[in-house]
Image: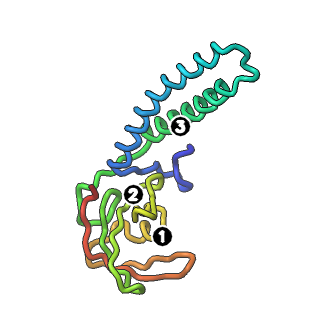
Amino acid sequence: MANESNNGRRMQLSRDGANKLQQELEDRRKLRLEITQRIETARSFGDLSENGEYDAARNEQSFNEGRIQEIERILNTAVIADATNTDRVGIGTKVTVYDEDMEEEETYTVVGATESDPTQLKVSTESPVGSALMDHRVGDTVRVETPGGTFGMRILAIEMAN
């Protein structure tokens, strides 16, 4: 399946990530009607072989329908991880760590693979930082192995992400 990781596990999403995908799905279903109207309007102009508006609307329709199918597949098969337990790091938790090499604190949100956003410090469970933190507790020191080297992080706090 396209949304499973290489080791055969089902994709995991945070509750927030699932809600955002659900909203995108609703928005794209509304867009579907707008695109259909644009196609009908462009068709009324006559010769479709030289009708750029028609071609553009059909391309947009194709992309939109593909994205609708992808979101539906993800939502129908993904495991939604609710961070109700903050004893251990898991999907949907915010983790404050002390980076021992950089000598600074950082707070990461652990998310599923499709939700990662390094600019927002949202780390995937499949990333070096996210996978090293998973299932650890406050006070644990983890070793993070990256292509640039290995470094240590001490977990200072775990809380539910918003």
Residue depicted at x 48% and y 62%: 126
Observer-nearest of 37 and 103: 37
Q: Position of residue 57 (x, y in %)?
A: 61, 28
Give the residue pinned by disc 3. 67
Quarter of the picture containing the N terminus is top right
The outermost residue toward the right is: 49
**Residue picked out by circle 1:** 128
- Whichever of callouts 1 and 2 sits on the residue coming sooner in the sequence is 2
- Dot in front, 3 or 1: 3
- Location of residue 95 with respect to 44 vertically, above or below: below
Residue type at mark 1 is: Pro
* Contact between labelled residues 3 and 2, with CB atoms less than 8 Å apart: no
How far apart are the two marked residues, 1 and 2, measured between alpha carbons? 13 Å
> Do the CB atoms of the residues marked 3 and 1 lie less than 8 Å apart?
no
What residue do we see at 41% from left, 51% from top?
Answer: 12
Q: Secondary structure at mark 1?
A: helix
Measured as percent of width and height from the top left, residue 26 is found at 40, 32
- Image-quadrant location for residue 47: top right
Q: CA distance from mark 3 to mark 1?
A: 28 Å
Residue drawn at point x = 34 percent, y = 74 percent = 106
The Cα–Cα distance between marks 2 and 3, rounded to whole angstroms, is 21 Å
User: Residue 141 occupies which quadrant of the picture?
Assistant: bottom left
Residue 114 x %, y %: 47, 52
Q: Identify the residue under disc 2.
A: 111
The kind of secondary structure element at disc 2 is: strand
Residue 105 appears left or right of 46:
left
Is 16 on the left or on the right of 57, as rendered?
left
Query: In terms of depth relative to the viewer, which is nearer, 48 or 87?
Result: 48
Question: Which mark is drawn over residue 35?
Answer: none
